[in-house]
Amino acid sequence: MDNAKTPDLWDNAGPFLYRIMPEGSLDAFFGEERDIIQITFSMGKWWLAETGEVGEDHYRTMKDAKAAGDKRIEEAEKAQDTVLLGKAGLDPAVWTVRYDGALTFVDQAGDRAIVADVDGRPGEQRWDAFQGDDVVAEGVDEVATALAAFSPMRDMAA
């Protein structure tokens, strides 16, 4: 049996405990507001609720509520890359997600990348596209526009 203690990642905001949820859309990823999952104690029970979700689940102990919340976050984190690729209109079989200071979509061959412009404002995200060492699109407002900038001739030559 593994005796390693799982770290407690819940922040205490006084009347409730919370954790920040992974983002489920590009707008949310670049936005200033974050969804949270929170735990409160009321009527002798521990209540677990997510921002934007209707209803709450209740648990007998805080430990049980935290475990259930941790599981929800873990599931959302596993799905986040696929969700972001889908929202960007990119095929998860061809593209992967990297978080190296900026959100970056990289093709499986590693020759093409679409990078979020970190200076963009929420709701006005800009994208740069790179093919090898060449910048093929800069400051475009749609991932699809960046994707269209890639040279099919270069792909065939590789």
Image: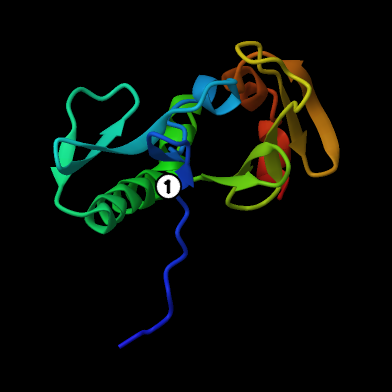
Answer left or right for 97 relative to 6: right
Q: Residue at x 75, y 26 (%)?
A: 117
Q: Residue at x 64, y 45 (%)?
A: 99
Q: Nearer the viewer, residue 111 or 142?
A: 142
Answer left or right for 85 relative to 53: right
Q: Classify 145 as above or below 22.
A: above
> Could you tell me residue 30's position as x and y percent?
60, 24
Residue 104 falls in which quadrant of the image?
top right
Answer left or right for 9 relative to 3: right
Element at label 1: helix
Which quadrant would the N terminus be assigned to in this image?
bottom left
> Could you tell me residue 22's position as x and y percent?
46, 38
> Could you tell me residue 19's position as x and y percent?
44, 42
Residue 14 falls in which quadrant of the image?
top left
Disc 1: which residue: 77
Q: Nearer the viewer, residue 82 or 63?
A: 63
* Amino acid at dot 1: Glu
Q: Residue at x 50, y 27 (%)?
A: 34
> Could you tell me residue 123's position as x and y percent?
60, 11
Q: Classify 9 as above or below 132.
A: below
